[in-house]
Image (cartoon, rainbow, N blue to C red):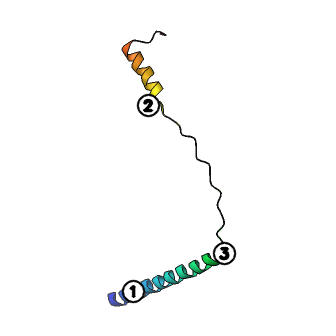
Amino acid sequence: MYLIVAFAVTILVIVLAWRGVGATRDSDDAFNQRPRPVRPQRPAPPRVVAPDDDPEFLSEIDRRLRGEDKSG
């Protein structure tokens, strides 16, 4: 029984691999015949600087910790 199942699975794998190779060749031929449509590109989102990465913020915190802040 196991031999029949193993044989069937082997045949299935071979058939799927054969179809996969054929599909790759067909898609390559179709790709060469038709120009590929150009996809619109999204603009890159603006870079956001987190407070702990902002040098101005870090120097402000440093001044406050040293007691150099005269505002309060």
Q: Quadrant of the N terminus?
A: bottom left
Task: Estimate the spatial distance between the alpha carbons at disc 2 and disc 3, rounded to whole Å.
Answer: 51 Å
Task: Estimate the spatial distance between the alpha carbons at disc 1 and disc 3, rounded to whole Å.
Answer: 36 Å
In contact (CB < 8 Å): disc 1 and disc 2:
no
Q: Report which residue position mark 3 lands on.
A: 34
**For this view, does 18 lie left or right of residue 5?**
right
Q: Which residue is drawn at 40% across and 84% down?
A: 9
Q: Report which residue position mark 2 lands on.
A: 52
Q: Where is residue 30 in the image (x, y as percent from the top left)?
A: 62, 78
Amino acid type, residue under disc 2 in the picture: Asp
Q: Residue at x 43, y 86 (%)?
A: 14
Q: Position of residue 55 (x, y in %)?
A: 45, 28
Which mark, residue 56?
none
12 over 53 or under it: above or below:
below
Q: Along the polypeptide, which appears first: circle 1 or circle 3?
A: 1
Q: Where is residue 54 in the image (x, y as percent from the top left)?
A: 47, 30
Amino acid type, residue under disc 1 in the picture: Thr
**For this view, does 69 lie left or right of residue 25?**
left
Q: Along the polypeptide, which appears first: circle 2 or circle 3?
A: 3
Q: Report which residue position mark 1 lands on.
A: 10
